[in-house]
Amino acid sequence: MMMNIDEVKVLLHHREPYLMVDRIDALTPHAVTGVKAHRGDEAHLAGHFPGAPVVPGAMLQELCTQSAGALITKFYSPVENYDSEKTKGHALGVLGKVAYAKYMGIVKTDRDVFAEVELVEKLGPLFKFKAKVLQDGRLKAKLMFSLINLSADRLF
């Protein structure tokens, strides 16, 4: 299943300038490939680094986290037909833990960045994932993290 930016926004509450998933190239109950196509004017690139922009590692983690969040919302939402604009009362895919993050190369801003995310384990509302970040077919990062579904009242 492929999804464009408008379809992604139905699944995620994130919006610009913090939305990191521009499209989804593949989506199943156990894996997702999220893609970020930088324009070069994103807020997180402004000072990282002037004259030689590099995607910050934290934003690579966020690309993986948001991609995983889309998977959770599509296949494991406690609400049928979830819509980020209309559905209230649930916070899906809240980052609970980054167990591992290894950055192996510089990610440039002029080429698409791919987050290949795999669901490793589901324990009730807790989801454990492993991810690879790739650019030009080269491995740039490996991550392991957990997301959790919460009722919105737990956020306030």
Image (tube, rainbow, N blue to C red):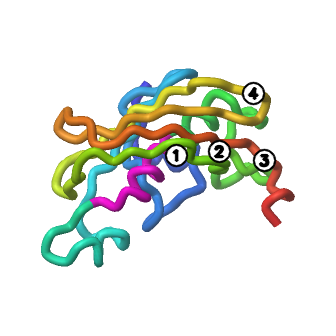
Q: Do the residues labelled 2 and 1 touch (CB within 8 Å)?
A: yes
In front: label 4 or label 2 = 4
Q: Provide the major secondary structure of the magenta segment.
A: helix
What is the CA distance from the residue labelled 1 to the residue labelled 3?
15 Å
Label 4 Cα crowd, 10 Å radius (few <14 / some 14-19 / many 20+): few
**Alpha carbon distance from label 3 to label 4:** 13 Å
Q: Where is residue 32 in the image (x, y as percent from the top left)?
A: 46, 30
User: Badge 2, how many Cα within 10 Å: few under 14, some, many 20+?
Assistant: many
Mark 4, residue position: 123
> Secondary structure under badge 4?
strand
Return the x and y of residue 52 as percentages of the image width and height.
15, 69
Amino acid, disc 1: Thr
Measured Cα–Cα span from mark 4 to mark 2: 13 Å
Q: Give the range drawn in magenta.
A: 55-67
Q: Is residue 71 above or below residue 41?
A: above
Say if the magenta span includes residue 56.
Answer: yes
